Every structure is written in C-alpha cells, then in structure tokens.
Amino acid sequence: MSGSTSRTQTPLTALARLGFANLEIAAKQTAAFTPEQRDVFGVAADPDQALKYLNQLFERDAGLADSIRTDLPCLKNLVRLLGASSGIAEFLRRRLEEVSRLISGEPVLPNEHRIRQEFARDLRGLNGDEAAVSLRIVYRRILSEIALFDLSHPEPLSQIEPITASLSDLAGATIDAAIGIAKSELGSDAKLAVIGMGKAGARELNYLSDVDVIYVVEPREEESPEHAVREASELARRIVSIISGPLPEPALWELDANLRPEGKSGALVRTLESHLNYYEKWAKGWEFQALLKARPLAGDFDLGTRFVNGVAPLVWASASGSSFVESVQRMRERVTAHIPASEKDVQIKLGEGGLRDIEFTTQLLQLVHGQTDERVRVRGTLPALRALCEFGYIGRGETAAFIKDYESLRLLEHRLQLSKLKRTHLMPRQEPELRVLARATGLANSAIELRNTWLEIKAEVHSLHERLFYRPLLSAVASLPEENFALTSEQAQARLAAIGFKDPAGALRHIAALTEGLSRRATIQRNLLPVLLQWFAEGADPDHGLLVFRRLSESLGESHWYLRMLRDSSGAAHRLTTVLASSRFVGDLFERTPEAVAWLENDSDLEPRPLSQLLEETESLISRYSTEPENAVIAIRQIRRREVLRLATASILGLLEISHQGKALADLDTLFIQSMLSIALASEAHPSDFEFAVIAMGRFGGAELGFGSDADVLYVYRANDAEQGQASAEAVISRLNQLVEDFQLPFDLDINLRPEGKNGPVARSLDSYRAYYSRWSLTWEAQALLRAKGVAGSKQLIEDFESLADEVRYPKNLSNSDIREIRRIKARVESERLPKGADPSRHLKLGRGSLSDIEWLVQLFQLQHAVTNEHFRTTSTLEALAAATGAGLVSTTEANILRGAWMMASRCRSAMTLWNSKTSDVLPTDRAELDGIARLLGYPNHSATKLEDDYLRATRRARAVFERHFFEDQTP
Amino acid sequence: MDKQRDFVLRTIEERGVKFVRLWFTDVIGTLKSVAIAPAEVEGAFAEGVGVDGSAIEGLTRLFEADVLLNPDPATFQILPWRGEVDPTARMFCDVSTPDGQPAVADPRNVLKRTLAKAADKGFTFYTHPEIEFYLLKSSKLDKSGRPVPVDSAGYFDNVPGGTAHDFRRRSVRMLEDIGISVEYSHHEGGPGQNEIDLRYADGLTTADNIMTFRTVVKEVAIEQGVYATFMPKPFSEHPGSGMHTHMSLFEGDTNAFFEAGAKYQLSKVGRNFIAGLLRHAPEITAVTNQYVNSYKRLWGGGEAPSFVCWGHNNRSALIRVPLYKPSKPQSSRIEYRSIDSAANPYLAYSLILAAGLKGIEEGYELPPEAEDNVWNLTDSERKALGFHPLPASLDHATSIMESSELVAETLGEQVFNYVLLNKRREWNAYRSQVTPFELQNNLEVL
C-alpha cells in the first residue's frame, strides 16, 4: 500500500487501525456490526480476542446479543473486559447471567462495604459446597467490576493504589465469607483471626496473588488452648478448601500460611500467646521483616488487632540487633536470588530493577529510620515512600520517580495477570503478546516500544536505589544544591551502620573530606560516592577501603585520567572498591603506586607481564644508569612493587588463575634477583674468572610462591683462587642483600636451606659443594636439593651446579636406613619446629596435614623413584605428586586429598597476606579476619566458621594419607 | 525477647534474687557456671557476658579471644536448693563468638546444628532418658579403697524410711519445681543405685534437662548429707550406671517410626535409623561412653550391651525395640542402651541422631535381629551371626572414632579434634597407673 492512497480507507485498514491483527477474520465476523459498533473494538487490548469471545456469548444467548448490540456503552464495557482478560471472558461464558448487570452503567470501584453486602446477600441461606460456589462467583463478579473500572480509567497509573486496596478488601471479605460458611458447617464459634501478611497485609494485592496469612485463635472461657487450636485448625483447613478446593466453579487463589511460625512444619493455628512467645524466643530477623506488613484481614478484628499490636514492638527492636546487617544482606539476596536463567530477561518482580528491588529499598529505609521515627512505620510501599519523603529521608524528585516506576511495573503486572487470571510476573517474549500488553497498559504504542520502556524503568529503579539510600548520606556532610533536604549525621550514621560500616562516624568524615569544596574532583566524587559506598559496603572491610580510597583520591588529586576513569568506567571503579575493601596489602601498594589505578580499566593491564619483557625493562634501566646505579636500584624496586601489585590485584579480581600465581611470583623474584645481582657484580671487584650464581630453593625453586613468601636461595661461585673467590662471593652477597632491601615491600633472601644450615658458610664454591655432598651423604640435604633451580648468574655455573645436584637428589640407591633417617627427622621437626603454644591443626606450614607433611611425602617418593622414573625429576610439588599417582604410589583419591590440602594451605597463606598485609603461618582465630580471608578465597560472606571447618577437614584427611604412606613401609 | 526479659528482671526484683548463674556446658559435658549480680543482668541480655575462652575445657585451643555468653531468658529459674535466704537463679546460655556467630565449640550448638539437619529432612528428634546413678555415704572411700553405698537394696525395692526414698522424693520435687517432668523413679539393681526417668521431650530440651538433672541430684545429695555419682561403673561387682535412651523421629504430628502392620510396627524410616545407628555405633562410642571407666560398665556383663545388634525386647542387645502397645501408635520408639550417665548429652545425642539419619539417607538394610541373650552365645556364634563387639576400651574407641567422617562432620572439625586430644590424654594418664589389680596379682608372685 502506498502512502498516497492511505486517505481512502479500505475496511481492512479501518480494522487494522482499531487494533485487529487477523484482519480477514475480523472483517468477516464484524460484517453484521454497524461502523459505530465496530469502532467500539478500539478500546480492547486485544480486539481479536474480544471479538471471538463476544461472538461466543452472543451465540449462546441471542436475547443478550440483541440488547447489548444496541447499547453502545454496555457493548464498550463488555468489549473492554473480553479484550483484556480471557480469564474473565471464560467466567462470563460459564455464568452468562452475570453479564448484563456487570456491564450496565458507569464502571465504579466497589468499596468494602458494598463488597461485604454482596457476599452477605448472595450467600444468604446457602451451605456447604453450594455456598462455596456462590462465594467464588461473587468474588469473580466483583473482581470483574474492579477490572472494568481499572480498564476504563483514562489514567490507570493513578489508580494503582485504589485498585490494589479494593482487591485486598475483596480478599478480606472473601475470607470472612468463607469463615462464615465454615463456621456454620462445623457448628463452630471459635474466635479466629486471620492476619494478612505481605501484600494482603499492606493492602496492595495483585489481581492474582497468593494471599499470605497467619491464623490466630483465642480460647473461649474455660476452653483449653489445645482444644481451641484443634477446632480452629479444622476451621482454617475448611476455609482453604472453600477458597481453593475442587468445585464446579474454579479455585480462587492459594491461601498461603507459610509465613507462620516454623513455616510449613509449624502448627497451622496458634494462640496469641503462643505466637508472641515464638516471636520473642525463636523468630529470625527476616520473620520480623515479614511482620512489618501484618494487618488484621478477616475474622475476629479485636484479636487480630491485639496480635498486630503485640508483634509491632518486636519488629522495631529487631532492627537494632547485632544481626541486623546480616539480615539486610539476606533481604537483598532475596531480590536477586532464585531467578531461573530462562526468566532472567523477562522477570518483572525479581532481579535488579524489579518490583522487589523497590520494596527492598523502601523496607530497608523504613527499618533504619523507623527505629527512631515512628512516622515512617507504615505498611504499604507507596505510603512508606511518601512518609520517608515527607519526613526528610529521601528526596522529592527521586521519590516521585520511584513511585512512578513502581506504579508502572505494577500496571504491567496487573495487566499480565488479568489477561489469563493467572499468577505471573513474566513479561511476554513474543511480539503479539507484547503488543496487546502495550495496548492494555497504555504505556507504549508498540511491542518494541513497550519493551524499551520497561528496560528504562528497570535501569532507573536500579539507579534510584543508590540515589535514595546512598546519595542522602552525602547531604549529611556536604551541601548538595540539588537536594532539597539533608539528613542529620545521626541519621546518616544509622544508614552506614546498617550496611556494614563498623565506624560510621569515621566513614562520614571520609565522605565529608571526599566531597567538600568546589573542585572538579569533589564534584565528580559527590556524584560517584553514593554508588561507591554501596560497593564498599559489599566488601569485608568497608571502613578501611573507604579510608584508602580517600588517600588515593587525595594523592591523585585532579589527575585528568583518574577522574575520567571514575566517572566513565563503572567497571574500573567497582574493581577499585572491591580490592580496597578486601585487601590491605593491595591498598598499601596502591597508596605507593597510585597511577596503577589506571590498570583497573583494562583486563590486559592486569595480566602478568612476561619475564622476558620485564628483564628488558630492567636491563635498559641498568645500562641507562650505569654510572649512577642507585637510580636503577630505586627504579627496579619500584618495578617489583608495581608488578606484585598487578598480580595481587588480578588475583583478587579473579583474573589470575591460581595455578599461574606461583609461577608469576617466582618470575618476579627471579627478575629482582637477576637485576640486582648484575648491579652487585658490576660494583664489586672480583677476579676475571669469577663466576657466581643464585640457586632458588624451596617454594621459590618449585615456582610455588604466594604473596609474602620469602625467597629461599643458595649461593654458588667458581674461581681459580679459592680464597679470593670466597671473599668476592661474600662481598657480592652482602651488596646484593643491601640492594634487594625494600622497606615498602620487604624482600628476604633466606639462606637457611644451605648445607650445614646456620653454621655453614654463606656461599660455597661448586667444588666445595661437591666435596661436601660426597663426604656427607645426608639425605635431608638431598631432599632440600630436590627443589633447587638456578635463577640468576652464570649460566654455565648453574648448569654445572644442577648436574651436581642431580647426582645428590636422585640417588641411585636410597637405603632403608636413609629412609628411616628422613622419617625420624620429619618426626623431630614436627615436635621441635612448631612454635611454643601454636595449635598444630592451624599451622599452615608445619601443622597437621598441611604444607610440610605433603611436601615431605612427595619428596620421599622423589628420592626413592626419581633415579628410575624421570617424571619425578621436577621441582614442583604438584608435578611430583602427579608422578607418584602415575606410578601408583598413591591412589587418585589420596592424591586429590593431598593436592586439595596443599592448595588450601597455600591459598590461605597467600590470602592472609593480602588481607592484612602481614605474613603469618597460623590460621587466625579472629572472626573478622577469617571472614575477610574466606572472601578472598571466594567464599560467600559470613563464612569464617565454614573456612575453618573446611581447612581442618582437608588437613585432617591429608594427615591420614600422609601417615599411611610416610611412616609405614609400603611393601611393593 | 522483651517480655521474657522484663519478666526476668521483674522477678529478680520481686524475689530479691542475689545472684544469677549463667550456665553453659563444656565439650566434656561439665556444667559451667558464671555468677553475675542482678544489676548486670540487663547488660547481659543486651550484649552478652564476655568470658575468657581459654579458661574453658574444649575452648582452650579454639579461641584466644573471649567468647560471649548470651543468656536465654526463657530458661530463667530460681534454684530451689538455695532456699530463700540468698535466692539464686539460673539461665542457660548460648555461647557465641564476638562477631555474634554461634561458637563451634559450644556442645549445645553442635546439637542444634544436628537437629536443624534433621528438621531439613522434616524430622523432629524426641528422646527420653533413663538416668541411673549411685548414692554413696560420701565421696570418700572406705579402708579397702571402695566407695560406700547408702543402702544395700535392689531393683524396685522400697526401702522403708531409707535415705534413697526421701532422696528420690525430694529430687523429683525439685526437678518439677525447676520445670522438668519426671516419668518414674525407682531403686535400681545395685546397692544405693537409683534411676529417674525424664519425660519425653525434644532432643535439645532433654539435653538441657539432663544437665540440670545432674546438678539437682548432686545438690539434693549434699542437702541430705550423702553423695551422688554418675560414674559409669563405681563397683566392679554391681551394675554400672547407664543412661538408656528411648528415641523416635516425628514428621509433624506423626511418629515416623510407626507403620501399622509392619513387623514390630516398625516403619522403613525406623529400620533404616536402627541400621544407621548399628553401623556407626563403634565410631560414636568414644562420645557416648567417654571415660576409661565407661568400658568397665560396657564389658562388665549383666545387662550392659557389648555387641552391635538389635532385638525386639531383647535386653542384651545394643538397640532394643520395646514391646509395642497397640493403643499408642505415637509411642513407637527404639532404645539405645550403651550410652552411660556420664556422657555429654549434647554431643552424644548429636551423634546418635546423625548415625540414624545416615541410615535413612543411605537406606541401610537392617541386619537380622538378635533373638537370644547375646551374652550366652559363644564368640564363634556371635561371629557367625555378625554381632561385632563394641570397642573394648577408651583407646580402642578413640582410634575407631579418629577415622570416622560421620563423627568429624557432625561434631565439626574443632570439637572432633578436641575430643580426640582429650580422650588420648585420659587414656595415657590411665595407662601410666599401676593398679591394685596388678599389685595383688603380680607383686607377690613375681
């Protein structure tokens, strides 16, 4: 069809304009209608559906057809209902007699009085199932009236509150009517109150929600509580069957009593006393939050009121308890938890930006401020938002936007539920359904537009949370021209404490410092802080994170890139808050290398730098500063700090695989030693044939380093003149020790694994090593050499040393007495080296089933088998363990236990250093520390006990495997 | 909480209470008590009372920092034996870490955790203990180094005007005063031996009640100038003091052990539970029978169950399925007979429950029942029937427990570790003794 002919309307065009989709069918079926009658279909959300049902009704009742067809207002009402709700259409088809009365006259919203009258009138004289059927018909009739009013209103958004109130009144009246039927059936006059919870309590029900209730009974005089409860329980069960049991007229909705004390396993009905007793003694935090909305809904009003008044003080007392922060976090989790992946993109209720997100924000604010301000203690979401706004806790603009978003989401939900009278919170995916929904809500003109509108609302809700909860925190310390109110600092501190800041007053001071003044930085930070605060609060140590952020921000000042990054890259800003609130180690390093903050924007900046590239960098530094080596030294130290920071940051953000971390850290130590050694060799005089090398030992040799590990080394040299060689080597070593010293990020060259230990010379010539090893065939020296690997100095010397080492560490015949000696030393080390008073089960290195147990076992295998099986010739513990598994020395299960414990202990040590920048070998007992460490290891919040238990279990099992294989003879 | 708290504070004022004792239990099962002044009670409710964790058996290694005692106002009772001169009250406490998490080494918390696990599967655990103990003239031994009982009566004997009679009447009265219902009380088999049965209650309440019970019995004894002991086997020639415990699982209001028409009316759940308990019995014995002396009872003949088997109304079996009363489907239950009166009830019940639940989870098959008196069988007969012995000594029990994942899992790694350490220490101390037995038999001969 071309544009020029569009003025002349063909009939099909007219139908399309009205909103029909199946034009051919519509044309055929509307043939008998006058144009005026046909135009009525324009009001239907789904004109095709309206037409289909209308024809069905007319076919069944010709008289009805005649009277309606000529009465345009009536026809309009009917078409509206049929087009918006197949559920109501089916109801009318079942109950043709309901049609006329429903659609005659102007639609009005039924009030509670009228609703109750109607139940009374229609149920009079009826009993049993007959009464129940009648009850359901009255319910659906009134529901249809509400729907018709809703659908006819020119501004349905403005009607959300009256509509939901009317639906709630209808539910209450229905339950009351059901109580009446049940009582007369059972001949009971029990004093039963039905408490509305959730949406029913807050008078904000949907078209089709479960109705959450709690039953309370009061024994009559001289009646025992047991008897009263038994009778009332029977009554309650009958009420449920009246409302949702199988009958000729379908069930209404679930009457859900699962919010009652003890949930599903608890008694269905309790006395008031038993309820209060439960809430005083047993109830958990979230149960009190559920009570926030409790209201007498049906049954005995006086009893219901006493229940609500009885529990009200408890609700508010719970908000001040120590577990409040935790229950807030659980509440927040309820917003996003349990969404099936298939529903993520269509959920209206759950998820970020969903209805529950709005309810969460509102309730959180109520709980924080309701402790001291009774005026915000109201049930409904909308009244609560208005109260919070009126009394100065949230801004007017945000409140208005939040209310509008809430109403829009509710409108979408209402229309969706109305459509099939089914409980759903999912946006349709298909174009036709979306189009109908767009027409039904009036929120958009097309399917695509509706979807976009919805996505915008979601995004806005999500950002409003931050603007409602966090932004006002700033108003307590800074004057915000855009805000028309200010929190007091007490109010702001209450909010900070609720989200987990331990020193809210301190946090408020940092916020003040970050936002004061007119600088560009202060302006940007004023905008950013609300969301940053939220992210800090998600970390283990928000207080410290905020403090370091303040310092960083002060030292980076007005740096253009920094402000731009914070402003434009929410990913980078989120990462910054994450690392700062979880690791003092990283915080300290960032303070010294603030420009490294820029890496957070780019994953590739957080990848470990290859050793070769770093070596190039240090070599060029050394040659550039050959005349003033002290400058090169300073720069190289800085490079090490920078690279350690890179690795630590990447590891916290989960960008560095655990299996790569040890190698990357060993590379950094290698780099550092190589660079410093070349400066040391250049500055110290030595004979021309002097060769020198550094051999990595222990975890360094095995490339298994963690953050904060020492570097175990041996020094070897070769020179013709032994005396001069020794003097030169000692001079080089002493110089090297000075050069590597770094007070900001300490580095220790540990030579305790050298022959003869503390009594041995600091360095030996290769010949001296050879002589020593051939004279003293001490197996523990051989064991130490298993992880020896040259890392710096003369390549030839390293090669010669390693082949010497091979002879020692891969012995041709390990005698039984050698093996016995290793076992004995291990046993002695266990008792002697453990510090006095240390708990062996918590010592990560020397404790039960921890690092040294596993390493000694693996090394024993290596000493025994490396000579014949080259897979054992490795400096890596895990590779050697794999070799042992391959050779059948331990079962796969046992190997997994050993590997698991070894990894766990290694990771704990590393995480402990990251957490508080202190290196320790003992798993802490402090709960906050354990929690912080657990989070760094990827556990959820509050996992202190879980981490302890996991660690102790892993090492206990490893110890059992160790004992089985290490101390006992395994006959092959 | 507020109403309960207010009630406590008010009662303290009205009754002029001078001290409030805060009760909790260490890993071994010793009742610990910290007394605070009435003025401190309000603060104790709000913030807990800090105590030095290292002073408490079992907490020593676990916490360098303080732990907090959080009194439960619902357990407030005026202690009846202190009289009205200086009224004293008590409350049980939950032990928590300074960050408000339940302390892992609090046995009450171990039991709560295990009960919660059962609740996840829809079960409530009910128990009913029969607690035996001896009344002695004093804690002092006679010239031959033996304790002296207060009387020489036997099972169900009514001792006219006897101390034991008064004693039981007074104890039962006090127990009822403090809110613990008593089912029976009678004179047991040994001289001075008594048994008092507590009413059926959920596992946690029972364990609390046992702790209170022991204190009440000891206090009444002091009042009457005698001495009460829960030592498992004070006399080699008389029966030991056990704590046979009847138990059942309920699903809501129905007894999950009951199935009409099944053999012994025992449901599949019940059979699996018994099978689980049998299979893991050797592993949990170091806790249900936790002292060196416990094994003197376990292997002292008489009615002590020494072999892992079950039987219908068979008093020589480890697990007895009592005679079923047709009128009472709710009373279907089983009786575990090895546990003794000196066990830590929180830990012992946790392990018994966990073992039974394991049987249900894994659907263990119930082995055939023992129909004869197991003690009258020969070793080979028992072997043939598959009735394995329970551990022979504390040492044996400890090493079996050491490799039990079930026990480690249930107690938690830290309590598990502590119990092992503690039991080894006890065994080593015992082993280093030279006993009268050795001196009598060896000294003159060798």
Image (spheres, helix red, strand yellow):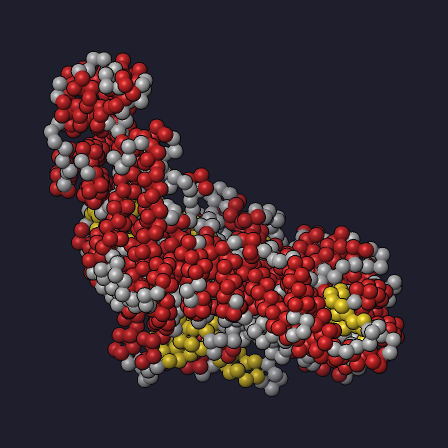
Up/down of B278 relative to A494, above or below: above
Relative to B85, is A658 on the left or the right? Answer: right
Residue drawn at the location 44% of the way across and 75% of the way down: B215
Up/down of A825 relative to A947, above or below: below
Name which quarter of the figure residue A457 lies in.
top left
Quarter containing the C terminus of chain B: bottom right
Relative to A557, is A73 on the left or the right? Answer: left
Q: Position of residue B59 (x, y in %)?
A: 52, 73
Residue drawn at the location 12% of the way across and 31% of the way down: A106
Count of marks placed on residues: 0
Residue drawn at the location 85% of the way across and 59% of the way down: A867
Q: Nearer the viewer, residue A971 or A235?
A: A971
Q: Position of residue B180 (x, y in %)?
A: 38, 67
Q: Position of residue B345 (x, y in %)?
A: 50, 66
Q: Is residue B138 visible?
A: yes
Relative to A961, is A274 on the left or the right? Answer: left
Residue drawn at the location 19% of the way across and 50% of the way down: A300
Q: Nearer the viewer, residue A790 or A121?
A: A790
Name which quarter of the figure residue A742 lies in.
bottom right
Residue situated furthest left in the rendering: A105
Q: Is residue B4 visible?
A: no
Residue situated furthest bottom in the rendering: B143
